[in-house]
Structures are given as C-alpha cells and as structure tokens.
Amino acid sequence: MKIKYELLKNDTKTKSRYGLIHTNYGTFETPIFMPVGTQATVKTLSPEEIKEIGSGIILSNTYHLWLRPGEDVIYKAGGLHKFMNYDGPILTDSGGFQVFSLAKNKKKDITEDGVHFKSHIDGKKLFLTPELSIQIQNKLDSDIAMSFDECIPYPADYEYAKESTERTLRWAKRGKDVFNNDNQSLFGIVQGGEYEDLRKMSARETVKMDFDGYSIGGTSVGEDKDTMYKMIDYAISELPIDKPRYLMGVGDPIDIIEGVIRGIDMFDCVLPTRIARHGNAFTRYGKINIKNAKYKEDFTPIEESCDCYACKNYTKSYIRHLIVANESFGQRLLSIHNIRFLTKLTEDLRECIKNDNILEYRKQFIEKYRDNNENI
C-alpha cells in the first residue's frame, strides 16, 4: 500500500495544517518530528523506547545501510522493519547528503551519471547513482523512500545552483523510472538554493512527476534564519495541498515552529541525540548544558513539566554525574528527553492548529526559549 495523506484541519491564520499519514505500519499525525536512526537504530535507544516516547515515524540512512550490513542482508531478513524489530513507519533518505559531503571535488566528483566518492569506513572508491539509490531503498522496504538529489551548499552562486537543480530534476525522473516496490512510497525533493525562481521552478517540475510526497532540501546548511524561511516559502507556494511536505534535516525547536506555520508536515534531524551525547538538553527555557557545576546538587528533573522517562525518574544531579563519568546511561536519558521534547512540541503544535492559536503559541514559546540557551 502507498501512503495516504489525509488533511483534517487548516489553521485559519497561517498555512499550518493538521493531518494524518496512513502507512502499512500504522497511522501517524502531522506535523511530526522523526528521530534519526542512521544505522537502523536511534543511537542508544531501543525500538520500544522510541515508541514509548511517542515517535510516529523514524528515519534511517540509505548510504550507511548500503555499506553496512548491505541492502541484500536486510532484504533477506525480510526488510528493514523486521531486521531492526521496529513495527512502526520508517522513512529512508537517499544517501545524497552523506555522499556529497564525501565528494571532495564537487565539479569532478558529481557527474551527470552519479557521484564518485570514497567510503568513510575504508576509503574504498564508490559510485552512487539515482537508480542505485532507489534500488537499495526498494530492498530496504521502508514505507517512504527519497529521490536522489544534490544538496546545494550555502552559499552557492546562481549558475552552480541552477545547474545542480536541473540535474536533480533529471535524477528524480531517472529514479522514479526504476522505482519498483508497490508497498513503498517515493518522495521528490525540491532544491534551488536561496534563489526564488530556482526554488519555484524545482517545485513545479518535481510536482509534474507526481510523487507520493514532496521534500524541501538544501536548508539548514549554514544560511541565516531569514534565508531559510524564505526557501521554505518559495517551495511551499508551488506544492499541492493533498500530499505530505517534509523539511529535511531541521530539528531546532523554533525552526520547527516556523516550518509548521509555513505549511510543513514532517521534520527530521540528528540534533536531539547528538547534543545529548555532549551533555545538552532541550528545555522550554532554552538548551542547558548538564555538565555545568550549578547542576551538581540540583535534585530536580531536567524539566518539571516533561512526561518522559528521564524526567519522571531522575534528577539533573544524577544525569550530570553520569555524563561527567562518561556513562552511556546518561546519554540515553538525555536522548530520551530531547526526542520527547521535540515530539511533545509537535503534539502541542497539532493542538494549536485544531484550536487556531498557533501564532499565540509561537509568541509565548519564543519569549521563553530565545536567548535563554546556556553556552553549550
């Protein structure tokens, strides 16, 4: 079964919307944040913990699974859901972001056929094409697969962005032509850099290919916030209302709120688990660094109002002790809290859309959160 998007409510004052996405492995509400399980695991957490946190869908990485253990191993196991014992929806990215970060000479390594690069594991020469990316994802058997695209760096001059965007469109068609999994859906990706005409052209031409959903790529790559929000606005204006919209690689709480207000349904980012490994936690009053000495004898939860396992059972003092002692349990607890913080944020945003008060929520959230971040 292909996914089905069901739009249930539009906010009356913004472009935000509340909906459902139906998949073979269950239905989840949107807007939603997807934890990243790069190598078929969300770092330090079990699938059961991810479900308990309230995550409706997770993301895994095609590039990493291609290298280890290999798509054929996962195919023989019965697909990614069975391989990792996760019975919820899974999205796989195309591997493009990782590949382009490994391509040293963009003008030589990125060709019309695909991308030449070296493995980050053993330095072996590799070549990934739009067709191969899709074929790998077909074998992984995720609920949602992504087109192979080039993530345009920021800044990039207009000519480079234009050439790259047009190539991404050709790659999207090539990938769609070989897509061969009736139980899987395929999303197209909008590129275009910071340029309005390229963003809109990319969106229009991608929509013409009739994908099952649409992603906005090439944001959160170093640009300022105003530029990022404009990139979203340019693309959203050309995307259909009856299919999901996914903003790739975005996990900052304020950016999620701004994205939802602009009409985004899905988000993903490694941020919550990455900052957890360095002892940092999201709170309604900004990010905190649990390693700070002031938490040594702080016997309160990370956040009093949080309903996660970490906050219901442990104190900042204890978690600080674990992090300072380099105990992995501390990283697990912070990861649980940070992912729950973002999933709870999207739950709150869904309720705001239902009640037409998302602008008020944004104002109140930003007043508490902005400029209160500790030096992390």
Image: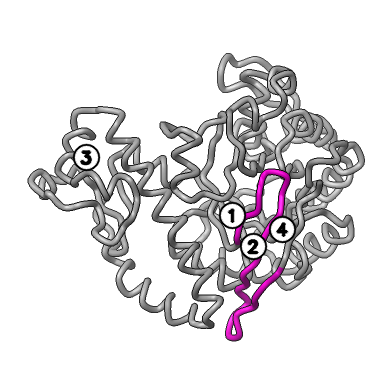
Q: Residue at x 78, y 47 (%)?
A: 186
Percent position of residue 42, x then y = 49, 36
Farthest-out residue, left? 297
User: What range is drawn magenta here?
Assistant: 7-29
Residue 12 is inside the magenta segment? yes
- Residue under pointer 2: 194
- Residue under pointer 1: 155
Helix, strand or loop under label 3: helix
Q: Are marks 1 and 2 in contact (CB under 8 Å)?
A: yes
Disc assigned to residue 81: none
Percent position of residue 37, x then y = 54, 36
Percent position of residue 359, x then y = 48, 80
Q: What amino acid is at disc 3?
A: Ile
- Residue under pointer 3: 319
User: 260 or 111: nearer the eye?
Assistant: 260
Residue 267, quarter of picture: bottom right
Q: What amino acid is at disc 4?
A: Gly
Q: Residue at x 43, y 34 (%)?
A: 45
User: 152 or 307: nearer the eye?
Assistant: 307
Q: Residue at x 37, y 72 (%)?
A: 366
Question: Magenta residues: mostly which secondary structure?
Answer: strand
| Of pointers 3 and 4, the one earlier in the residue sequence | 4
- Residue under pointer 4: 192
